[in-house]
Amino acid sequence: MGKMESTRPKSELELASILKTAYDYACRKNYEKAIELCDWLVQDSSTEIAGRRERAAVKTLMGDVDGAIVDLQYVLEIDGLEPADFHALGILLFQNGSTIEAIERFGDAVKIGEAAKNYYYTNSSLLFRAEAKLKTCDFEGALSDVSGLPDGYKTYFSGTGMRSKEDIADEASAALERKAQSKFQFKK
């Protein structure tokens, strides 16, 4: 990195180019160079957050979900204003089995996304949160989350494949119907 230390990015365009280079390395499975470039960015306060975001993406590609979570949690402590960060962290937490915390992070993404009128992250976070709520048997919550989504809205879930608003609504409704017909009623 010797030469790089004197050529820190001086503009957003230069930073974007370095971030793209790191991601390109990762896509070619040259993780060592990708991480090295991200680590170099993290060393300077002006590029630390961008470096950590990119390092989280690289670690995700590497399969290091725990490492990616640590980087994104740090980003949110310092700069918790981007719905994309909460959305990405929610997905990683959900994949890692931390469903309750994932629901919370998706909720943060929805709140920030709605305030910023960023419907991509709002809608995607609602669908992911609904799927997570299914896993915790919060069927009413899952139905509530998908009720505001456009018909046919869908996204890819790692390990499951494509899931739509209608898929989740059908599963939640069926579970509520089974619960209503059960001769055993559980108290909350």
Image (cartoon, rainbow, N blue to C red):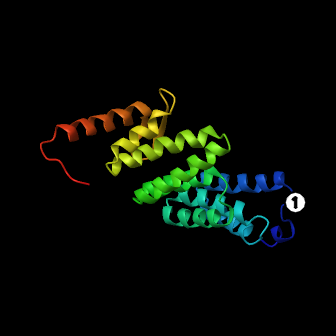
Tell me the crowding category of disc 1: few under 14, some 14 to 19, or many 20 or more residues within 10 angstroms, Cα based.
few
Q: Is residue 161 positioned above or below 6 on the image?
A: above
At 79% from the left and 56% from the top, the residue drawn is: 15
Displayed quadrant of residue 182: top left
At 35% from the left and 46% from the top, the residue drawn is: 134
Residue 160 is at least partly visible in this image: no
- Judge left or right: residue 40 versus residue 75: right
Q: Is residue 126 positioned above or below 10 on the image?
A: above
Residue closest to the far left: 183
Q: Is residue 185 positioned above or below 29 on the image?
A: above
- Front residue (pair 81, 154): 81
Residue closest to the far front: 187
- Judge left or right: residue 117 versus residue 97: right
- Judge left or right: residue 111 versus residue 103: right
At 50% from the left and 42% from the top, the residue drawn is: 126
Residue 74 percent location from the top left of the image = 62, 67
Q: Is residue 82 positioned above or below 162 on the image?
A: below
Quarter the N terminus occupies: bottom right
Residue 71 percent location from the top left of the image = 60, 65
State the SS at label 1: loop
Residue beneath disc 1:
10
At 22% from the left and 41% from the top, the residue drawn is: 179
What's under tag 1, amino acid-wise?
Lys
Residue 27 is at least partly visible in this image: yes
Residue 101 percent location from the top left of the image = 46, 59
